[in-house]
Image (tube, coloured by chain):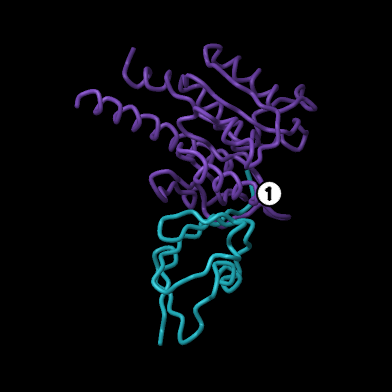
Amino acid sequence: MTQVLRINGVEREFPGEALPETLSDLLNALEICHATVVAEIDGRIVERKDFVATRLTAGQAIELVRFVGGG
Amino acid sequence: MTPVFFELKNSVVGVAGLGGLGSNVAIALARLGLGRLIVADFDVVDTSNLNRQQYYVDQVGMPKVEALVANLRRINPNIEIAGHQVRLTPENVPEIFAGADVIAECFDRSEQKQMLVETVLLRMSAPIVSVSGLAGYGRSNDIVTRRLSSRHVLVGDGVTAARPGVPLTAPRVGVAAHHQANAILEIMLDNGRKRVNRSWQ
């Protein structure tokens, strides 16, 4: 069965058992550094310290705002 | 007093970080006739800052807070300024920026940007205007202002990090800083319209 997450407004399919278990796993799969991203799941901010403990379920809407250096 | 001037005179803006972004944003806000500014930075002015930040050669070695407050007062002596020479943390951000109608994220390092945006969105009620992606030169029109939610506006091209060979330059940092100041102005004037509408109800 294919499961779906909506990431920054775009649906992303994960076939079979491939849905990342946690928000941290998703960021690793996307090669996004944890320290530079503000994450929101279904409209709620997830603190960076909770990325590893935050489990994902199919159908969630995830917003990831990435910051690059310079100012 | 025109309604716009009145609204700005009664607005409070917090500026976190007084480098290329923060020093330019604060000066734009001072020229607008803002009522009160809360500015915070731990650093001192370095010669390497002078290529894009609003300081002068004779201010090298001064705390940025002290130098910028002096420069802002020369532009607009009527502005109320609270300066904090401190390293911002999740613990002190809500206290330092208490009462701000809008907060400008003007840090250099991406981890600091993340920390401030997360802290403001979680622990405060004011909106935040942050920046990601302003290094290099050219491509002015790749720098955009996007409203991500009712409380978060993001400026920048989203990708161009400062790194060896891709320096921070006065023009492109200035483009981003003024996007930021312009977004803050828009938020302040929108707040004003909401207040007017409420008083009519």
Instruction: Say above or below: B179 vs B165.
Output: above
The N terminus of chain B, quarter of image: top left
**Whole-percent x, y for residue B10 in the image:** 42, 20
Residue furthest left as drawn: B201
Q: Amino acid at mark 1?
A: Pro
Residue under circle 1?
A: B167
For the point 39% across and 71% down, the residue is A59
Q: Is residue B180 left or right of residue B46?
A: left
Q: Which chain is purple?
A: B
Give the residue drawn at x 27%, y 25%: B196
Q: Nearer the viewer, residue B103 or B71?
A: B103
Q: Which of the image's four quarters has the C terminus of chain B?
A: top left
Q: Quadrant of residue B23?
A: top right
- Residue at (44% x, 46% y) in the render: B145
Above/below status of A58 relative to B162: below
Residue A14 pos. (x, y %): 46, 81
Q: SS for tag 1?
A: loop
Query: Mark 1 — on which chain does it sit?
Result: B
Q: Nearer the viewer, residue A56 or B86?
A: A56
Which chain does the cyan colour mark? A
The residue under the point 47% across, 19% down is B35
- The image quarter containing residue B77 is top right
The image shows residue B112, relative to residue B99, as above or below, that is: below
Of residue A51 and residue B63, the one placed in the foreground of this image is A51
The x, y position of residue B22, in whole percent, is 60, 34
The foreground one among A4 and B1 is A4
Q: Is residue B33 left or right of residue B91?
A: left
- Label 1 crowd (10 A; few <14 / some 14-19 / many >=20): some
